[in-house]
Image (tube, helix red, strand yellow):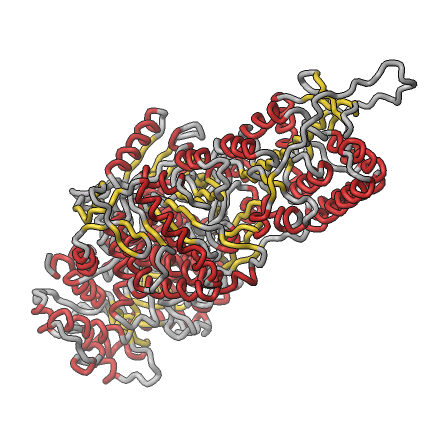
């Protein structure tokens, strides 16, 4: 091409980024890589290997090791050996290493960007301007957390060895998101990158050597799914996984009951809502960042476009015109918008989904752009004429495919946005601040972007609701995912208190009976007879007959969850109102202190003093929960932009609670009061041995103006009730205090809809210790953090001329 | 629709076209920050784009100390903006490269017309009480008529910013409309002076009203506001041009002015035009730079392309 021909065509022409430095690096390793264990690259004799390809050309880049269980175990051992010294190094010592990692990433930013782009197929512009700068930012930010660890998290310690498994869409960035907080908190790491994209992780391992990171602090085992499974099920203390929801569920089930801490960052089908009062051209440009960024291979991609009916026709026309301007090409071409799909397997998957969608009636439009002859490419795709039932509206495509439909009103937009199993992210376009800030909290998603999309920062937590996983990465909440409270190590074993084998029957003719008392279930603010019409006989402390409790069954659990779901308005009440009601419950309990003291003594056999103490603590706990209702607030983050990110604490939703047998009044009170203080609704299974202390409370709830359905109590046997509660798909969280086996059962059952589970793994909490089970330590379990990004600005002060 | 541009006769005042206009500043800035990182123009293409930029320059002098001598020198540069030896090096000998126009005050129009005779380079006159535009309407319109009579083929008018700031779109329409009538067959470029608008939504609305009233180009700035052409303001304006074309089939030109000094700036503006409006808007009949210092930087870059050695300013003929 000559100057003359360009003068006529004004085409862009080729603008390839040089890959010489990357080729030099690959050659310096002979194109073959082992694992990185204990500070060295190691090759396993006779070990299996995987070839790494450049998806833009199909060219083979390197051969990497396909790790075995033995390799994974060796890496875990190296990490275990290194952990004590690493944690003992202290916050400042670790901060120095994290700072050095951040600096070295910047110093090699170009090489890393080119390597990532080659290996993954994504545009060099994105690795250069987004991935790698965010990686450095993440290490800087977490150098800071390491520095401040002792001050900011005084009652916490490192979890131990973290096993981390990451996907191929943002290889080095996902590594940073996992490694930086883990190391900052004093954990050591075994990382398993995706088999398609391990090269930047290997380069990172080398950087760890360059900065002199102590051997074994960071270990890398490459390989495919089985290698990841070996890491997850090895002797690690913490598992962090980013990837598909299906695999996330498998991991949840696999490690259920093991006591390993878990964070899951899974799939999404994030809504992208455009209201008629939006800046339409900007909203269309935002879609380029939402769904054609990284070829749409983004867990939080705005893949479900919801556009208001009045502007839909014009919007689609403009959108298609914009799509026609997208350039698809080689990942190292500096003038492309969309690169190669990571692998032919992924392309086939996407095309398969498109076909299914079309079979279900979807209209599929692809840009008539030129695609390179070699490599794995897909044209940007728009799907219309679909309803919420179409597979392309429901399932994550993980490709450059946007599925669009319209809505009429704001309420309908919110309903459609929430009509999904996922809850990772959402985008809202509207120039009305009232509308945008009303919609943001209404959407079930961990991240909400207003008038922008796909904004990320290390200081702002990232993670999902629902089946998009749990736990957050980034920010304070992200640090908590790599720390555990110090008291945990000292917890004693939990011992259930069995009912006596024989309960003495009341004798006939023993005199005038008192008025018969009936403890019913408490569902939807009403005392309800159990569906089965059965009762359990409850013994007093001496094995005598104390009365009966209703024997609930699955249907009672179902009804209770339904009542709790209907009480969703509780979350929308003001914190002040919730506080008033909780104080009032405490007040009314205190009026009946004597009665509860007597009941405790009779049922549990504790001394009068001890019983009085438990009741007094229970009153105190209602006050504590009430006090926090309007004080356990969110934060305002200042990410590097003109704007704020509002970290809002939202209730988890409906929480199922299985109470322990010890301290039956205080444990019930503690758990329920803190849960509802944050706006959650509860379905409570009281201690099977001492249910009457819970049922005695419902009269107090009734007289304290607690709205119907906020607390629901189903008494009965754990065996019968717990499976129904733990597997109920309408329950968002589950707290379990019982045996180790029960804990495992709950975690397994919770996997299907990704309930936020908190189980005691058969350990006994001290219900009198406010550091363990009251205040913030407990409230953190009762909330989800949603980060709402609000860029702002309107004044024309000239903007930024570049 | 014909591919050639014709004079915009206007659409009449259509206030409802303004209703849906909302501009989000953060999103605009995000787009302009990335539009220039999404595209890269290198080697032969870069040379070609820089030559195209030269052809789109309204070579401008608007100083109180302008003299006929100064204007004649500028016209000489406009007729032959790039050393023919460089053009030869690029195989572009037969390219009759000139700047888009020469832009002067009314007083200098006759000098410029004479100096450019036969070159095909039009003379543009800034008018209507440039730069503040607050002279009496009659004298502003008379100024247009006199410049046209003196041979100016293009008139760069300024608007009353107060109409924008107070949202008096009817008044803005009427003002621009009467200027249009005074221009007759001359090409009218309407300077919005966006640096004196309160926000980008006002910029967008003023753009639309100016086009409705018959502007052939909309132009960012006089060059004397505190803030002149920026990519964000330009993005807002070119998107209104796109919508206007979608509604009417009429192509309106765009002229960023003030502060564009480097070849890199110029290429970035061309990228903006290509991405948002398309190839057709990269020709001088629809795109101009209002600039005085830009040309010398482009010349230095062109010499670098031709020789491989970085150049120095004094090696190129000054305008």
Q: Is residue A798 left or right of residue A32?
A: right
Point out the image quarter for the C terminus of chain A: bottom left
Is residue A238 shown left or right of residue B279? right
Q: Is residue B299 above or below residue A124?
A: below
Residue B34's x, y, as percent?
34, 58
**Residue B231 visible in rendering:** yes
In the image, what residue occupies the spot 26% across and 67% down?
B264
Residue depicted at x 24% and y 59%: B40
Q: Residue at x 70, y 16 (%)?
A: A533
Residue A305 position, x and y percent, is 42, 40
A212 or A269, which is in the foreground?
A: A212
Q: Going by the image, does A27 lie left or right of A601? A: left
Image location of residue B269, percent across then percent down = 29, 62
Residue reaching furthest right?
A512
Seen in the image, is B64 located left or right of residue B39?
A: right
Q: Quadrant of the N terminus of chain A?
A: bottom left
How far across and down, in percent of the image, does residue A61 sit? Answer: 19, 49
Q: Is residue A776 above or below residue A313?
A: below
Whether residue B253 is visible here, answered yes or no, is: no
Query: Which is nearer the eye, A521 or B169?
Result: A521
Figure disc tally: 0
Q: In this picture, is B141 found above or below A699?
A: below
């Amino acid at each position: 091409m000559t100057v003359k021909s360009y003068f006529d065509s004004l085409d862009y022409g080729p603008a390839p980024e040089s890959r010489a430095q990357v080729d030099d690096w690959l050659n310096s390793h002979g194109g073959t890589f082992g694992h990185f264990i204990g500070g060295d690259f190691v090759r396993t004799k006779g070990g299996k290997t995987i070839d790494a390809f450049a998806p833009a050309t199909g060219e083979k880049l390197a051969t990497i090791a396909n790790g075995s269980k033995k390799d994974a175990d060796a890496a875990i051992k190296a990490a275990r050996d290194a952990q004590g010294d690493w944690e003992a190094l202290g916050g400042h010592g670790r901060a120095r290493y994290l700072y050095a990692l951040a600096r070295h990433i910047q110093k090699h930013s170009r090489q890393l960007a080119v390597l990532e782009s080659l290996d993954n197929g994504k545009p060099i512009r994105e690795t250069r301007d987004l991935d790698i700068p965010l990686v450095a930012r993440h290490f800087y930010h977490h150098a800071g957390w390491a520095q401040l660890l002792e001050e900011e998290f005084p009652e916490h310690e490192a979890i131990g060895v973290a096993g981390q498994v990451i996907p191929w869409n943002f290889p080095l960035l996902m590594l940073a998101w996992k490694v930086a907080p883990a190391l900052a908190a004093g954990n050591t790491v075994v990382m398993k990158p995706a088999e398609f994209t391990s090269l930047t992780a290997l380069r990172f391992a080398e950087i760890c050597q360059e900065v002199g990171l102590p051997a074994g602090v960071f270990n890398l085992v490459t390989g495919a799914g089985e290698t990841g499974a070996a890491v997850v099920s090895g002797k690690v203390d913490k598992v962090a996984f980013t990837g598909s929801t299906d695999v996330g569920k498998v991991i949840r089930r696999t490690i259920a009951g093991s006591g390993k801490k878990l964070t899951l960052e899974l799939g999404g089908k994030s809504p992208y809502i455009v209201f008629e009062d939006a800046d339409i051209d900007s909203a269309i440009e935002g879609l380029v960042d939402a769904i054609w960024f990284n070829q749409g291979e983004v867990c939080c991609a705005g893949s479900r476009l919801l556009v208001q009916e009045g502007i839909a026709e014009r919007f689609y026309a403009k959108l298609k015109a914009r799509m026609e301007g997208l350039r698809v090409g080689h990942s190292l071409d500096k003038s492309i918008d969309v690169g190669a799909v990571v692998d032919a397997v992924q392309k086939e998957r996407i095309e398969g989904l498109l076909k299914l969608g079309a079979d279900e009636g979807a209209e599929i439009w692809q840009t008539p752009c030129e695609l390179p002859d070699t490599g794995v490419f897909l044209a940007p795709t728009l799907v219309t004429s679909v309803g919420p039932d179409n597979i392309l509206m429901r399932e994550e495509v993980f490709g450059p495919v946007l599925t669009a439909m319209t809505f009429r009103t704001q309420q309908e937009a919110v309903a459609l946005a929430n009509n999904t199993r996922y809850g990772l992210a959402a985008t809202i376009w509207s120039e009305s601040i009232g509308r945008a800030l009303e919609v943001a909290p209404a959407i079930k998603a961990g991240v909400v972007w207003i008038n922008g999309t796909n904004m990320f920062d290390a200081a702002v937590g990232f993670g999902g609701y629902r089946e998009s996983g749990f736990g957050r990465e980034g920010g304070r909440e992200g640090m908590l995912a790599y720390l555990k409270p110090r008291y945990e190590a000292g917890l004693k074993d939990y011992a259930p208190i069995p009912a006596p084998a024989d309960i003495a029957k009341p004798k006939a003719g023993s005199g005038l009976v008192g008025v018969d008392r009936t403890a019913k279930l408490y569902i939807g603010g009403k005392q309800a007879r159990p569906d089965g019409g059965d009762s359990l006989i409850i013994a007093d402390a001496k094995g005598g007959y104390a009365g009966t409790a209703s024997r609930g069954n699955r249907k009672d659990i179902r009804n209770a969850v339904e009542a709790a779901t209907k009480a969703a308005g509780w979350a929308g009440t003001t914190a002040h109102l919730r506080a008033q009601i909780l104080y009032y419950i405490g007040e009314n309990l205190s009026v009946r202190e004597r009665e509860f003291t007597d009941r405790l003594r009779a049922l549990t056999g504790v001394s009068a003093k001890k019983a009085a103490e438990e009741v007094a603590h229970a009153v105190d706990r209602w006050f504590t929960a009430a006090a926090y209702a309007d004080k356990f607030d969110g934060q305002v983050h200042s990410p590097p932009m003109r704007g704020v990110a509002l970290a809002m604490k939202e209730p988890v939703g409906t929480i199922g609670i299985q109470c322990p047998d010890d301290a039956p009044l205080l444990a019930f009170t503690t758990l329920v009061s803190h849960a509802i203080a944050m706006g959650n609704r509860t379905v409570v299974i009281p201690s099977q041995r001492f249910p009457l202390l819970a049922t005695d409370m419902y009269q107090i709830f009734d007289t304290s103006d607690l709205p119907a359905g906020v607390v629901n109590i189903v008494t009965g046997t754990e065996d019968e009730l717990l499976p129904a509660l733990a597997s109920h798909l309408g329950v968002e969280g589950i707290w379990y205090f019982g045996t180790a086996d029960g804990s495992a059962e709950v975690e397994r059952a919770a996997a299907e809809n990704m309930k936020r589970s908190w189980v005691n793994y058969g350990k006994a909490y001290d219900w009198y210790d406010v550091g363990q089970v009251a205040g913030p330590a407990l409230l953190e379990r009762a909330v989800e953090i949603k980060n709402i990004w609000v860029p702002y600005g309107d004044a024309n002060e000239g903007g930024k001329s570049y | 629709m014909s591919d050639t541009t014709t004079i915009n006769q206007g659409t009449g005042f259509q206030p409802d076209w303004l209703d849906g206009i909302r501009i989000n500043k953060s999103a605009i800035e995000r787009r302009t920050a990335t539009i220039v990182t999404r595209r890269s123009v290198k080697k032969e293409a870069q040379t070609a784009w820089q030559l195209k930029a030269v052809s789109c320059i309204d070579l401008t002098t608007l100083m109180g100390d302008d003299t006929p001598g100064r204007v004649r020198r500028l016209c000489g540069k406009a007729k032959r903006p790039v050393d023919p030896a460089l053009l030869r090096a690029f195989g572009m000998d037969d390219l009759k490269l000139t700047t888009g126009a020469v832009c002067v005050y009314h007083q200098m129009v006759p000098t410029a017309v004479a100096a450019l005779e036969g070159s095909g380079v039009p003379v543009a006159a800034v008018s209507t009480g440039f730069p503040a535009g607050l002279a009496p309407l009659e004298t502003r319109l008379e100024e247009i008529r006199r410049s046209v009579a003196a041979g100016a083929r293009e008139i760069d008018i300024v608007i009353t910013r107060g109409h924008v700031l107070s949202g008096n779109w009817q008044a803005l329409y009427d003002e621009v409309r009467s200027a249009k009538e005074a221009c007759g067959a001359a090409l009218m470029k309407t300077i919005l002076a966006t640096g004196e608008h309160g926000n980008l939504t006002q910029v967008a609305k003023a753009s639309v009203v100016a086009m409705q009233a018959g502007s052939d180009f909309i132009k960012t700035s006089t060059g004397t506001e505190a803030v002149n052409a920026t990519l964000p303001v330009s993005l807002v304006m070119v998107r209104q041009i796109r919508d206007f074309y979608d509604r009417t089939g009429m192509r309106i030109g765009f002229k960023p002015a003030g502060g564009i000094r480097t070849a890199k700036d110029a290429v970035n503006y061309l990228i903006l035009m290509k991405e948002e409006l398309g190839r057709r808007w990269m020709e001088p009949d629809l795109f101009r730079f209002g600039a005085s210092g830009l040309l010398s930087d482009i010349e230095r870059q062109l010499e670098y392309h031709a020789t491989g050695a970085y150049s120095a300013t004094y090696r190129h003929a000054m305008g």
